[in-house]
Each structure stands twice: as C-alpha cells, then as structure tokens.
Image (cartoon, rainbow, N blue to C red):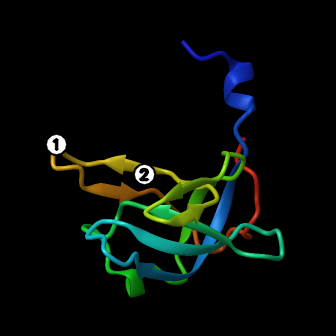
C-alpha cells in the first residue's frame, strides 16, 4: 500500500499539448511537446500512437507526472509521463484529459 506521503511525492500538473509526432521507427510511440507552465515545453514520449493521431492531440490538456527522472526511450529523452489508462490486453492506451480551461502548470492535489 502506498502512503499519503508516497502520493504527495508526485508532482502532478496540467499540461497542454503543443505538438506531437510519431517517433521514427516506432508504431506506438509519440514524441509530445507539453507546456506544463515552466516557460520551456517538456518532451515526453508516450505509447499512444495506436490510439491517437498525433495531430488530434494538439491543444488537448492532459495530466503530467512532472518529477520523474528523464529516461531515454528509442534514442529520445523523455522528461515526464502522461497519465493514461491501459484499455485492453493489446496495450491500447487512453490518455486522461483535463478541462481545456485549466491553466498549464496547475498542480493536482
């Protein structure tokens, strides 16, 4: 079981997707540029390309785990994680969207 203190360690923020593109050589990874209120967008890789077309994500508000260590995936550095739901055993992922009127960088509590 996670404690309340464990949960409080997560920095969950609202992010607005600025751009997205399929990662070269991948069928499921998108490289997504997200504004989380820091002045410089974050590049985050997400395995949602089988569920979403990159261009359909632009302007959407999502929930971002902002304080994860960066990780190199498929030769690209990912600087965060988008919160999603694994829909089925095929690994299709559904992103959790937030209301579009919430300011990027707003913290979830």
Q: Which mark, by number, is residue 7?
A: none
Disc 1 residue crowd, few under 14, some 14–19, many 20+, Cα 10 Å: few
Disc 2 residue crowd, few under 14, some 14–19, many 20+, Cα 10 Å: some
Q: Is residue 80 above or below residue 109?
A: below
Give me the C-alpha separation between circle 1 and circle 2. 15 Å
Q: Say which residue appears at 70% left-offset and 20% top-offset.
A: 4
Q: Which mark, by number, is residue 84?
A: 2
Instruction: Classify mark 2: helix, strand or loop.
Output: strand
Observer-nearest residue: 4 or 32?
Answer: 32
Observer-nearest residue: 57 or 32?
Answer: 32
Give the percent coordinates (x, y) of residue 7.
Answer: 67, 28
Question: Mark 1 and 2 residues: CB-CB less than 8 Å, in contact?
Answer: no
Give the percent coordinates (x, y) of residue 60.
Answer: 52, 75
Q: Say which residue appears at 25% left-offset and 48% top-offset.
A: 87
Q: Is residue 62 left or right of residue 89?
A: right
Give the percent coordinates (x, y) of residue 13.
Answer: 69, 55
Q: Say which residue appears at 58% left-offset and 56% top-offset.
A: 63
Task: Kindly give the residue lying farthest to the bottom in the view shown.
Answer: 55
Task: Kindly give the residue lying farthest to the left in the view shown.
Answer: 90
Image quadrant assignment for residue 34: bottom right
The quarter of the image holding the C terminus is top right
Q: Is residue 66 left or right of residue 86?
A: right
The quarter of the image holding the N terminus is top right
Q: Say which residue appears at 49% left-offset and 64% top-offset.
A: 45
Instruction: Classify mark 1: helix, strand or loop.
Output: loop
Q: Which mark, by number, is residue 89?
A: 1
Give the percent coordinates (x, y) of residue 26.
Answer: 30, 70
Of labels 1 and 2, the one closer to you? 1
Task: Kindly give the residue lying farthest to the front in the view shown.
Answer: 75
Comes first in the chain, label 1 or label 2:
2
Image quadrant assignment for residue 78: bottom right
Task: Kindly give the residue lying farthest to the right in the view shown.
Answer: 39
């Amino acid at each position: 079981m996670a404690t309340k203190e464990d949960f409080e360690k997560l920095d969950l923020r609202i992010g607005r997707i600025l751009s997205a593109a399929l990662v070269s050589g991948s069928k499921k990874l998108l490289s997504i540029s997200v504004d989380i209120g820091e002045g410089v967008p974050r590049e985050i890789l997400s395995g949602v390309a089988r569920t979403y077309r990159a261009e359909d994500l632009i302007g959407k508000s999502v929930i971002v785990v902002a304080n994860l260590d960066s990780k190199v995936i498929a030769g690209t550095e990912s600087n965060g994680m988008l919160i999603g739901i694994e829909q089925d055993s095929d690994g299709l992922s559904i992103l959790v969207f937030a209301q579009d009127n919430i300011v990027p960088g707003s913290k979830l509590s």
